[in-house]
Amino acid sequence: MTPFALAQTPTPNPEAWRPISYADLQRPSSATATYADIWKDAIDDNNRAYRARGDTRFASGNAPVTEAHFVIWSPAKSVVVSVLDTATGCTLKDVHALILATIKLCPLRIAFYEGIRLRTMDGGRTCFLELARGTAVDPNRAISYAAYDVSTKTVKTGLVIDHQAVDGCSQTIPLYPR
């Protein structure tokens, strides 16, 4: 059973802006199982692409894959807005060499958990902030963030580098069709 199948405490003040959380899915673990489950097909495709090129360095885990997420908890359901960063699934948008950051356009999925039921919805492509390995997240230099607008049932996202919003990286994502 995934962590999301268990009862959760509602998200306090969901409309407050929060940093996006990241999960390294290269080495499967119980802590990242929920996110790996949301993206199982894309992770498998990425692994196959690496093997097809003769790259077998990742036989004991997954080829490089990182996921970013924003979670909203409620008494009845939980929603995960998730973006997957793989070499095969993303395209380059911009590079900020001074702060060791790359912005990519990557696939977005929204996962709805109601008890043990999972339903996913593709959300197109969105910005993913990729920092060089070993670079600590510094909100004064580069950060991705999100908030849930309760009245419109939308998630607002954005990406800021050196205190400037990155063009094309602010989105309003509807969670339910109108």
Image (cartoon, helix red, strand yellow):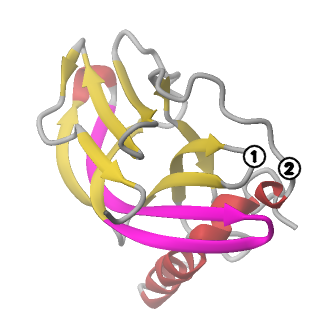
Taking the view exactly as shown, the residue that stands out farthest to the left is: 167
Residue at image position (45%, 15%) is 138
What x and y, as percent, mark residue 45? 48, 83
Between 91 and 59, the one nearer to me in the picture? 91
What's the mark number on residue 177?
none
**Quarter that holds the N terminus:** bottom right
What x and y, as percent, mark residue 60? 75, 72
What x and y, as percent, mark residue 168? 14, 42
Q: CB atoms at circles 2 and 1 under 8 Å apart?
A: yes
**Quarter that holds the C terminus:** bottom left
Foreground: disc 2 or disc 1: 1
Q: CA distance from mark 2 to mark 1?
A: 7 Å
Q: Amino acid at mark 1?
A: Pro
Q: Is residue 133 left or right of residue 98?
A: right
Residue at image position (27%, 23%) is 160
What's the mark number on residue 7?
2
Q: Amino acid at mark 2?
A: Ala
Between 125 and 95, the one nearer to me in the picture? 125
The tag earlier along the polypeptide, 2 or 1, is: 2
Q: Is residue 69 left or right of residue 172?
A: right
What's the mark number on residue 75?
1
Between 65 and 81, the one nearer to me in the picture? 81
Q: Tag 2's secondary structure?
A: loop
Q: What span is colored magenta in the figure?
A: 101-123
Residue 173, compared with residue 38, is above or below; it is above
Q: Tag 1's secondary structure?
A: loop
Residue 90 showing in the rendered view: no
